[in-house]
Image (cartoon, grey):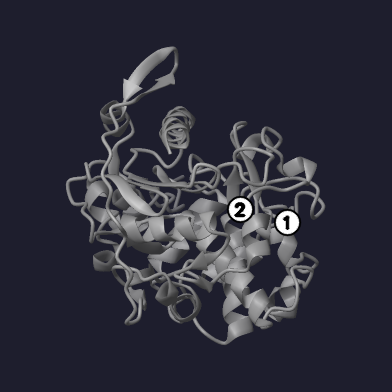
Amino acid sequence: MTSTTEPAPAAREPSWWDRQGDLIMRRPFNEWTFTHMNWLMPTERVARGEFRSPLPVDPHPLDLTYRFDDADFSLADLHRRTFTTAFVVLHHGAIVHETYPGAFAGPRTRMQLFSISKSVTSLLIGIALNDGVIGSIKDRVTDYRPDFADTAYAENTLADLLDMSSGVGDLETWEVADSGIRQFEQAVMGGGDVAQVIRAARRRTAAGESFNYSTFDAQILGWVLEAATGKSIASYASERLWRHLGADRDAYYWLTRARPRTAIGAGSFNATARDMARLGQLMVDDGVANGRQVVPRDWVRRSRGSHEPQLAVGALGPSGYDHYGYANQWWTLGSECFHAFTALGVHGQYLYVDPTADVVIVKCSAWPTQDDESRDRETIAALRRVADHFAITR
């Protein structure tokens, strides 16, 4: 008897469209893509306004070495070993060292900063609280986004999200093809429903109990900000933050392909390395830029460390390296209020702030992988060494 059963269709090979995120992030292409995201995705400008405040330049030779894995390395070694594309050091608000090893990078190049965007979103939340458009960090997500009422985020407060303690979502991993972050990336770049990906996330632990690094948490904060202010995150960032820094250039967010387009407040901010150094100096100076209190002082202090035990350095668990703590969408490096802290982005983006030394370091990179613990440890060792050098010689 002859079977009439049709053979099962062959599995569809992933198309370029499905794999564009991987292609954008792959070396050596990522040195170009990380400096040209506005050529690849729709964008919205973060205007700098008419005010400009040039950074003083006071060059210092940095022929120092740092210690890592029982060996000494120079900064040239750091740039080679960790694929640096831009490196800017401020001391007392002046550029003391600046280099652009990246093939397409320079002082006016706007860099893809990935999750440093989360720290920018945190600053905007602090400003919105001070403006009174957001009532309190104890407000619930659903006070601003009622469309999340039937999701795992229904009971979460803004404080839960700011400290990555929502208890929602799996461990964020890029190595698993169907992980939540991979689905998020594909929706953003492939025209899918980004909000639906986040709404589908399941609760894993009770809110406020443990740290779990979450792009979803940060993205919701961006949407809360937009709902509270009635403005896009780019517009609000321009009006209440960027135009007060005296920035060299407009910044921008790239947007989702699907309409209505939305910025990725969790990862699509692009700006020059010098302008990001200005943002770091704002954090050194307790939220003051050019004589104006741009970010509330208490909000800056909240970003330097937390008294919550699950957010202490070494206590973050599997979604944070043991040399980090966490607070307010920033990675902390010590328990003291004036200790160094940093914003981080995948593929090696750093905005390192040491208030005690009055040092800010911006390092942009094009790592071949999203995360790399060894390269991260080496980078932090080098940045600490640079900051300590100026703390001693000031």
- Residue 209: x and y in percent read 81, 48
Q: Nearer the viewer, residue 143 or 176?
A: 143
- Per the image, label 1 sits on a secondary structure element best described as loop
Q: Nearer the viewer, residue 331 or 167?
A: 331
Place residue 256 in its image quadrant: bottom left
Q: Residue, x 42% and y 50% (percent of image)?
A: 92
Of the numbered discs 2 and 1, the one sitting upstream in the chain is 1
Q: Nearer the viewer, residue 95 or 181?
A: 95
Q: Is residue 253 at all visible to an observer of this figure?
A: yes
Which quarter of the image is occupied by the C terminus? top left
- Per the image, label 2 sits on a secondary structure element best described as loop
Relative vertical location of residue 59 with respect to residue 64 in this rendering, above or below = below
Q: Residue, x 41% and y 64% (percent of image)?
A: 269
Q: Which mark is residue 152?
A: none
Instruction: Specify whether 263 is left or right of 210.
Output: left
Mark 2 belongs to which amino acid?
A: Ser
Relative vertical location of residue 370 with respect to residue 161 in this rendering, above or below = above
Relative vertical location of residue 260 with respect to residue 152 in this rendering, above or below = below
Tag 1 residue? 166
Q: Residue, x 46% and y 56% (percent of image)?
A: 281
The reply to whether the C-beta atoms of the residues labelled 2 and 1 are less than 8 Å apart is: yes
Q: Is residue 87 at all visible to an observer of this figure?
A: no
- Residue 17: x and y in percent read 32, 60
Q: Which mark is residue 214?
A: 2
Which residue, as the protein is rendered here, is positioned at the far left?
103
- Residue 272: x and y in percent read 31, 60
- Residue 329: x and y in percent read 60, 55
